[in-house]
Amino acid sequence: MSDLNGKVALVTGSSRGIGAGIAKEFARHGAKVVVHGRDTAAMSAVRAEIEQAGGQAIQVAADVTSFAEIEDMRGKVERAFGPIDVLVANAGGTPIKPSPLEEISEDGWHASVDANLTATFLTIKSVLPGMKERGSGAIITISSAAARRPHPGSPIAYAAAKAGIELLTKDVAAQAGPYGIRANCIAPEGIRTEQNADLLPTAVLEQLIEQHPLRRLGTPEDIARAAVFLASADSSWITGIVVDIAGGAVLV
């Protein structure tokens, strides 16, 4: 696999979980990695792990629902490392619990859409002009299996926001392709992070495993290896796709 030697990679939401896994894998492939989040201690831990393994990293805090803060973050990155070659718009989450649509508050809806779709839009909006000027770049967005298969227990606002990210990614691929920029989306499912491993009882984990044809849960490293491929020259003829990394639980 082609490495990312010397590439500047911003991975939003990389202080823990999937984002941290991607940041560390990028560093192992030679990228200069920007660790992003709002938890200083968590960012510092990821940065320290990268540097202890011989990689290069900086950490930058920013609210990715604020374009002004994203622009400030981009300036800090460019002063430290140079222009951003690879963007992984990973920051997101489920700020409200799954519930019937009529019980979702307007504030809860906006919180979900802002944390996921709006944050992805604003981050791409900040980074894309520089990529166009240089005539190259790789953008990777993060969706979810919740956007790939309707379910009565779905977190509707989160699922809708993630589905929006998928179409946003395809539109960016269509618009930015003539400038040498590729945009692809990863849709994870059943990823066992440090957080959910601690929260879920063993019996629940076993039930989740049985829902996957490969009979295991995924890891952040499973997502990270796919992200490296999509960021590298090995995928130079791939753009505008959604990759399900779900152990066979999503078959479309």
Image (tube, rainbow, N blue to C red):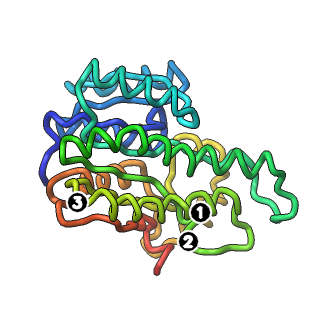
Q: CA distance from mark 1 to mark 2?
A: 6 Å
**Which callout, 2 or 3, points at the residue further toward the start of the chain?**
3
Q: CA distance from mark 1 to mark 3?
A: 47 Å
> In terms of secondary structure, where does tag 3 sit?
helix
Badge 1 amino acid: Glu
Circles 1 and 2, Cβ within 8 Å, touching? The answer is yes
Residue under label 1: 206
Badge 3 amino acid: Pro
Locate residue 91, reporting x and y percent. 51, 42
Q: Quadrant of residue 131?
A: top left
Residue under label 3: 178
Residue under label 2: 210
Name the residue rendered at 32%, 41% in the picture. 129
Placement of 5 over or under 94, stated as above or below:
above
**Which callout, 1 or 3, points at the residue further toward the start of the chain?**
3
Circles 2 and 3, Cβ within 8 Å, touching? The answer is no
Name the residue rendered at 42%, 67% in the picture. 244
Locate residue 35, reporting x and y percent. 39, 29
| Of marks 1 and 3, the one in the foreground | 3
Placement of 73 over or under 202, stated as above or below:
above
